[in-house]
Amino acid sequence: MFDRTQAIEVVSGTATYEINLRHYTFQKGDLAIVSANSILEMTDFTPDYCLRAVSLKSDADVAPYCMLVKATDTTMEIGDSYFALIDATLKRGFNDVIIDHLTAALREEILVLYKSQEAVLHTANNRAQDIFNRFLSLVSQYSSEQRNIAFYAEHLFLSPRYLSSVIRNVSGKSVMYWVELSVINKAKIALRYTNKSIAEIARDLHFDEQTTFTRFFKRMTGMTPSAARD
């Protein structure tokens, strides 16, 4: 999990990630912004995979997101130029003001490129896919507290029945599959990267009892939270 929003340039190689329930392939020349509090897991990578990253000022009260811009001559020129400037500035002596301006400009460059690529892709996209994407963003943000279809349907201005139908048709999985997958990913991150007790993690994820959380975890993973931590 990132504790700060990151701007990323892939220098070489290829890697696949699961970020906020979605699958991404990062390749040489790609640029990306991955927000703070994103749930990120690398699932595969080539031996030559290498990236460089710089922290950005995090968005407040925004759902976790990943903006991936696929490699072009423009992305490589922008990434190389900005990261070279940032590196040179750091070597001359850390300057908060200059670094803040450079990272803010890099963020805007990536955002413009992302919107441009998304506009092209959207022409081949349909409403169902758009609903699915927005649903996953909501799940990443709210699954710790909200685990009922009605909540997500209301936020998407849809009926629960229609939302269930769309998610099933697009993904082949149910609404609750995605919600529970998000919860279990958050549980795994907490077990792996924090010193919180299992009881504290259960409370953070809004389980009434630790035993309820343990049963849920075992049903989803085949092992107890204690075993997963060991």
Image (cartoon, rainbow, N blue to C red):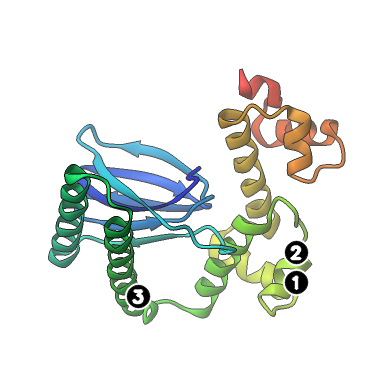
Secondary structure under tag 1 reads helix
Instruction: Work out whether 226 lies above or below 150.
Output: above
Mark 2: amino acid: Ile
**Other-residue count near label 3 (Cα within 10 Å), few / some / many at <14 / 14–19 / ≥20:** few
What residue do we see at 69% from left, 27% from top? 225
**Is residue 179 shown left or right of residue 33?**
right
Instruction: Give the mark nearest the N terminus, 2 or 1.
Output: 2
What residue do we see at 68% from left, 54% from top? 143
What residue do we see at 51% from left, 74% from top? 130
On the image, which quarter does residue 202 sit in? top right
User: Mark 1 and mark 3 in contact (Cβ < 8 Å)?
Assistant: no
**Is residue 130 shown left or right of residue 155?**
left
Whole-percent x, y for residue 49 in the image = 24, 38
**Is residue 25 shown left or right of residue 39?**
left
Instruction: Give the mark nearest the N terminus, 3 or 1.
Output: 3
Mark 1: amino acid: Pro
**Other-residue count near label 2 (Cα within 10 Å), few / some / many at <14 / 14–19 / ≥20:** some
**To which residue does mark 2 refer?**
149
Secondary structure under tag 2 reads helix
Whole-percent x, y for residue 196 in the image = 68, 29
**To which residue does mark 3 refer?**
115
The label nearer to you, 3 versus 1, is: 3
Whole-number angstrom distance, CA of label 2 to CA of label 3: 30 Å
The residue nearer to you, when weighing 110 against 137, is: 110
The residue nearer to you, when weighing 41 against 96, is: 96
